[in-house]
Image: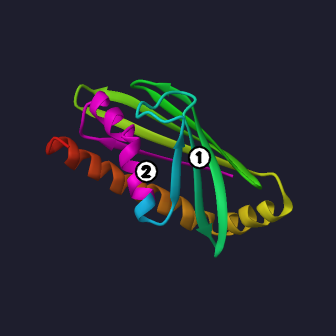
Amino acid sequence: MQFSAREDIEAPIQSVFDMVSDFERFERMAMRRGIDVRRLGGGTAVTAGTEWNTEFKLRGKPRQMSVVMTDFDRPSQMRFDAASKGITGFTTVDFLALSPRRTRLSVEMSLAAKSLPARLLLQSMKLGQSRFRKQFQVRLSEFARELEQRHLHGG
C-alpha cells in the first residue's frame, strides 16, 4: 500500500529542510499525542542510522514500532524505515528547490504486511484508501502552511 503527497512551500530549501529535520520538535509533538518516543543512541544530532522506538495505541491495542533513518542527505532527502510486529514500511521525504525562495516537499509512504493480522489491518485501510489519501494530502498542506509561518516569523 503506497501513499504520496507533495506541497510547494514559500521558503528556501535549506530553511524547509532544517525545519523538517527538527526531530526534537516532532518527538515532543508525538508525546503530547500520547505516543511514547525514545531516541536511541543519545545525543541531539540526527544522522543516517538514528533510531527511535515508539509505543502507541492503535484501534485500542498497544503497539510498538521501531523507526530508523536510513538516509539523511542535506538538503535533498530523508528516508525512514519502520517496522512493527506485523507491518514494515518506509517513508521518503524529498526536497526540491523550485526557486531560491520556493521549495517542493514530497512525501511517499509505503506499507507492507508480514502477518495475517497485519494484512487484515492493511486491507481495512485499503477500503478507506481514498479518504486516507485525501487526509494525507490535507495534513501535508497544513504542515506546509505551518512551515511557511515559522519561516516568516523566524522560528
Q: How many marks?
A: 2
Percent from the top left, x then y, of residue 13? 31, 29
Foreground residue among 115 and 51: 51
SS category of the residue bearing label 1: strand
Alpha carbon separation for disc pair 2 and 1: 19 Å
Q: Is residue 16 left or right of residue 119?
A: left
Residue at 64%, 52% (x, y): give it. Answer: 65
Q: Amino acid at mark 2?
A: Glu
Colouring scheme applied when the structure was drawn: rainbow
Report the mark closest to the observer, 2 or 1. 2
Which of the labelled discs sits on residue 27, or is there none? Answer: 2
Residue at 55%, 67% (x, y): give it. Answer: 131
Q: Which residues are magenta?
A: 1-30
Percent from the top left, x then y, of residue 30? 45, 58
Residue at 40%, 39% (x, y): give it. Answer: 105
Residue at 46%, 40% (x, y): give it. Answer: 106
Foreground residue among 154 and 8: 154
- The local crowd at label 1, few if under 14, some if 14 to 19, many if 20 or more residues have their Cα within 10 Å, is some
Which of the labelled discs sits on residue 84, or is there none? Answer: none
* Residue projecting furthest to the bottom: 60
Q: Does 105 sit above or below residue 31?
A: above
In magenta stretch: residue 3: yes
In magenta stretch: residue 85: no
Foreground residue among 121 and 37: 37
Q: Does 47 sit above or below residue 36?
A: above
Q: Which residue is mark 1?
A: 109
Percent from the top left, x then y, of residue 103? 32, 34
SS category of the residue bearing label 2: helix
Quadrant of the rendering where the C terminus is positioned: top left
Mark 2–mark 1 contact, CB under 8 Å?
no
Q: Is residue 59 left or right of residue 11?
A: right
Q: Is residue 123 left or right of residue 48?
A: right
